[in-house]
Amino acid sequence: MHKNYQQVLALVFAVEEINQNPNLLPNITLGYHLYNTYHSDERTLESSLKWLSGQSPTMPNYSCRAQDKSVAVIGGGTSALSVQMGSLLELYKFPQITYGPFEPLLDDKVQFPSLYQMAPRDAFLSVGIVQLLLHFGWTWVGLISTDDMRGEKFLWDIAEEMARSNICVAFMEKIPVSERHQDESHVAFMPRILASSAKVIIIHGDADSLMILRHSQPLILTSLKVWIITSDLDITLRARHFDSYAFHGALVFKHQTSEAPGFSHFLKSVNPAKYPEDIFLRTFWHSTFNCPDDSAKLEKEECSPNSSLEDLPLEHFDMTMSSFSYSTYNAVYAVAWALHEMFLMRTEMGFEGHGESFTLQSWQLHSFLRNIHFNNNAGDQVVLDEQRNPVAKYDIMNYLIFFKQNEMFVKVGQFIPKGLLGPNFTISEKSIIWGISQTTPESVCNESCGYGFKKLSCEGKPACCFDCVQCPEEEISNLKNMDHCKRCPEDKYPNKKRDNCLPKTVMFLTFKESLGLTLTCIALSFSLLTVMILVVFVKFQDTPIVKANNRTLSYILLISLALCFLCSMLFIGQPTSATCLLQQTIFGIVFTVAISSILAKTITVVLAFKATRPGSKLKRWVQPRVFNFVVFICSMIQVTLCGIWMATSPPFPGLDLHSEPGHIIIICKIGSVIAFYSVLGYMGFLALGSFLVAFLARNLPDTFNEAKFLTFSMLIFCSVWLSFIPAYQNPKGKAMVTVEIFCILASSAGLLGCIFLPKCYVILLRPERNTLDCLKQKAGSNSHSEILAGRHI
């Protein structure tokens, strides 16, 4: 992993910079020893023992180095390596500053009191990743992390954050971390990844896990996926069977770091001739520039004399300071400032020794490291107190690699946690180049529910896997993947697709529409017919049939029937406050007058025949003013009921919003239900009384007896209005108005036809039967009583 040599160069650069600074550690020169850990637990312990012993083979608890002046160890690219080093170094109280990823478990000062972490905390990494998922609508995501405590914590945090945002985990795989050389059977999860329907995979780990992953099966087919990679995983590293083309188009969360001033210029000047004793640099140069194996040629600068690190592709070396290199740079300065503070304190306290003459113990540095606080040359604040460790900020980088071209990182967004103020997340979709897809990939368990549909969860499946069902008739969904449909406002209705609310059309029974026009014509026709019958009766008022039927009552009945037909027209047209009041009051009063007239006529017939009997005392009651008084009293009772109705809770115009989809129907609401049915009930009482009286008089002589006609007319009237009561409850809107109009017309027509049409037939077509002589001849033995009855009537 020669690319990590930048971390060594960062350490060298910091040491040289400090040694050239007259204000920091004056008269003191910093030095360093370099040891390779090979990213192996065994090699890490071996290198640590070599440094402590000063020779090989190692001798624990013994150092062969004379006047050893080492004061601190900077190392631990991973948490596993830091633990291995820390367990050994803690025996000697050596300060250890790690530059690898921040590990919360290493904060335990009981277990690791001499260990300090330089990297910022990734406390909000899972929040930033979930923000990215939500931005692109990815709800079906795979997770890969290391099989250790750090990986477990990441999986726990990211899964919890995803669950809060209704994002589901499609699969969860773990990379073993015991050693980098793993059998393929131990990491054979690539087939499962390829078989998964999840198009987005989040991978979290460190350098060790990457080396394990690169020794697994080839990743070429995983270019079909979108990778979201954390900053500690450097996908530009190369090895056998490892194809970076699989990560083309990946999105990487990289720590935001400042560039140390002069570091780029320093990297351009680095070569084996400048540092001839650096065996790592010679090996690195030999590998990257394809130098000959002869080391003498390297020393004589015969290997690419004009070569520079800036000429190397990204897979070999990165000229931009990495987060690990930046942490290493700050770690060196932290040690230097701690030494500076300690020497300054000793000088102020009057100790004679200074610099080379001062004997320094490494454990003495701890109190100064814990309180270190300074600004580096890049202007950033540096602290080693884990409680005050800064929270990491992230640049979202798009990793691109093209055929026969260098790979690169392009910044497409950033995530800066702001604590209580909320996270600051930005992303530029137009700047992102995806893998093999030309458009933004989708990663969902199943297709989104479109407009007009809602999600229906499936039993036994994650929340992101659902069925789509259409919204109910009265509801819509105008967004995708809605959990619940919503109802339209009362003045609107759903369209056929149930994805939008349309304004309802205001309507009412009008004279222009076919139904209203038909009912109007029927009402006018019957009203005209009633007037014509009235004219006939007036013209032939002196004939026996007209006289025998109480002319005054017949006129009142005909006039009230004409008004009954006309009052039905009040129910047609746009309802207003005036028409709503007139509809029910006029309807109730004129019908009461008509039924009262029929009741009076029926009583007249009965009393007339009863009064013709010898010695009857009913003769004084067979007077026209008596029957007119009956009509007046019955009508006034109805007028009183209507007056009470209008005074308490009168009818009023209202809106029917639900009877007909897509329409708002303007209707007259009856106000008081009790008053409405009281008016109907009173008319029914009168009608029932008329029916009973006429029924009892059905067997009277037939010549002048119209009791049978009255009985049949009342039977029709009662049947119509008894049918009206249940029929009035079910229809809504215009149908309800139509039912009432029909009942008015049908009952009025029944009265008109049954009572007056037979008489008009005799008067107009059979005038010979409308004479007193004809009636005498036909009456026979009963003529005397019938004629007397007719005269009384």
Image: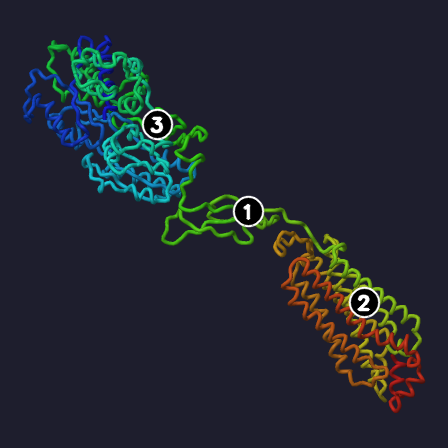
Residue type at the position of mark 1:
Asp
- 277, 253: nearer the viewer: 277
* Percent x, y of residue 158: 33, 39
Look at the numbered disc 1 and give the secondary structure of its residue. Answer: loop
* Cα–Cα span, label 2 and label 3: 91 Å
Q: Earlier in the sequence, mark 2 or mark 3?
A: 3
Q: Quadrant of the C terminus?
A: bottom right
Q: Earlier in the sequence, mark 2 or mark 1?
A: 1
Q: Earlier in the sequence, mark 1 or mark 3?
A: 3
Q: Which mark is residue 625?
A: none
Closer to the eye: label 2 or 1: 1
Closer to the eye: label 1 or 3: 1
53 over 249 or under it: above or below: above
For mark 1, what is the residue? 499
In the picture, measured across the screen, residue 540 lies left or right of residue 215, that is: right
User: Crowdedness of circle 3 by 10 Å Cα count: few (<14), some, many (20+)?
Assistant: many
> Which color scheme is applied?
rainbow
For mark 3, what is the residue? 393
* Percent x, y of residue 99: 24, 25
For mark 2, what is the residue? 561
- 333, 389: nearer the viewer: 333
| Displayed quadrant of residue 396 | top left
**Residue at 6%, 25% in the rendered image:** 57
